[in-house]
Image (cartoon, rainbow, N blue to C red):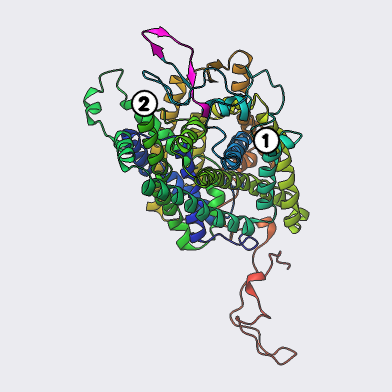
Amino acid sequence: MAGEVAPWNLLQIAFIVVYPAWLSFTRMPSGMSLLAAYIFLFVLCVPPVFIQLKIGNHQQKGIVGLLSKHVPILKGVGITLLIQLFLVCVYMVPMVTHYGMYAFIAIAKSPYVWGSCNNAWNTPSCQSHIGVNSGSLLGVVYSTILGNPKTPDQLPESQFFDHEYLQISGNISDVRGFPVWTFSQEVQNFSGSILPLAMVAVWLFIFLALAFGPRVCGWILFVLGPAFLALLFTVLGYGYSHLDSNGSNTFLYDLYNLDMKQFSNLHDENTPLIQDWVTGFRLVMDSVPVWTAILPTMGKMTGNGRLSRNISWLFIILVYAATCQLPQLCMAPYIGNLQQVLPNQILKIAGFEVIFTGMAAAFSKLEIPPVYALLFYLSIFIAGVMFLIVALFTILDNLVEGLADWSETFQERRTCVNFCAGFALISVGVGCSILHTTQAGLYYIIIMDQCTTKLYFLTVALYGFCLIIVYAKQNFGVAERIIMSMWCGVSTIITSAIFLYYFITELSTVPGYNNVLIRGTWDLVCWVLASAPFIAIPAAMIHSCQQENGSFGQKLKYVFCGIKQDPYDPPTEFGYHRPEPSAPPYGTSDARTYTYMDDGYQMDEVPYYKTVD
């Protein structure tokens, strides 16, 4: 494939890999969590990132192709990774659509449509400026007067998101239909629901980015990366130049404050240190695509040069280290000054509520020009679209690669196959995610987010084992293979152990939203979503055993060892290369003298053939 696909250069990679920073919009790490995140980034992420990019580059194959070639019996692990990645895309596309829609809602009406309590969707509990002794800014806020409980108060931004934008139903089984908005005359003139159409438009844009091959896809990502950074820096610049610096400084000081006393209280079971470190760990592992199928494909697209093979991993690590704090630095002046306007609020700076409620409240309460709200939400939308394009390109490339290896007809018509397979993939994605845009859609997003990574400790353990086997079979330096394989093994053990700890501690947690818990039959659905991708592992084992028609020993050798690493040592039944002559042939009929450098004597294209006596 190296000769057919234009590789992405290192400059493109540097701008493409800015997209992992987008998770920091909804997960602002505290000082201790941030310290843990950087330690885990350099200790646990470097070896698997290095190995995946290098073997993908060297072999010019995606993860399924790599495992099919070197460990056929475990190729199902690669398929499992692709299924998990697709499930993530299914619920992330509607979430990204919400970010994009908020960008246009921000400029739909002046002042902000979400900023007042004088609308049809507001309830008596709506309070623009909630009083003393209130609780959380994001979500429900409980106020008390003289110790007597009062009706829970809500910010207008929260009620707009729940009652008008989502028109959320009372439980996950109450689907109802799609939300029909009434917040402006323009949307009222539209006779249907805009949200599912907007989601289909996002899927269509992703299809156009994928359908015309890696070169077009790479350039689209290369344009979106700088656009994301430019929009983010524009909003950041306005915040620090026009808003009170005291609010920003206070917020950042409280956020990044390192409480080193926590290390002396490790014996205390209530110490927040462990939770802070787990939070930092999840931020890195969920942002950087370390244990997904993305990196081998990305390595495949970086070209097969020695320089890109050995330093592309450094771009991913350093770019993430430099950009992962940009979202919260961008939001700091807005949320910090919002704290001054509403001084009695306890901010909860985690989850998507900080985007749809916290920042929305900051834009309206601080009277920020709507264009900056547009740019803010558009920056999150672009970063999310970049992730979706990279993830779905990975799935499509592995799919097309498998089809091309299966049939010479598909190999010869690879462009057509890529287009048709991309259309089929996007069509399935649209069908799976349409339910997430209904009035119960947010519940489906939450449950898929909780469940698709429930058994991730098992994924990491299997994938790390496969990576070490494939990497050890390459012809790189012996010392490099020993060191990186051992480092990757340690990283796999530690990472899977932390994921297992997280799985055990969160086992009794019931997902929900606004005090509506998702339980009962949906517990079974959650386990099905978590375990279904692993069905590919035994299925692929059976398939690999059926591919070899030889003896039991030959089958055993094939399923565990795959094809030999040295491509210049063909099996005896396929013959050998033509022996090279001691000198170029002279004295031809056309009186032309040939040399090894002439086109008429192309040694690189000499076919295999059997020697005939």
Is residue 210 left or right of 299 when viewed as pictured? right
Q: Is residue 151 above or below residue 503?
A: above
Is residue 384 left or right of 327 when viewed as pictured? right
Residue closer to the observer: 72 or 209 = 209
Residue closer to the observer: 393 or 165 = 165
Extreme-bottom residue of the structure: 591
Element on which disc 2 rests: helix
Q: CA distance from mark 2 to mark 1?
A: 37 Å
Q: Position of residue 248 (x, y in %)?
A: 34, 40
Quadrant holding the N terminus: bottom right
In front of the other: label 2 or label 1?
Answer: 1
Q: Residue type at mark 2?
A: Gln
Q: Position of residue 124 (x, y in %)?
A: 54, 17
Q: Residue type at mark 1?
A: Leu
The label on residue 195 is 1
Query: What residue is at 75 percent from the left and 90 percent from the top?
Result: 589
Q: Position of residue 271 (x, y in %)?
A: 29, 21
Examine the rendering and report whether any part of residue 450 can be seen. yes
Q: Position of residue 335 (x, y in %)?
A: 40, 36
Is residue 83 left or right of 177 when viewed as pictured? left
| The residue stretch that appears in magenta | 144-157
Residue beneath disc 2: 275
- Specify few, some or many for label 2: CA neighbours under 10 Å numbering under 14, 14-19, or 20 or more: some
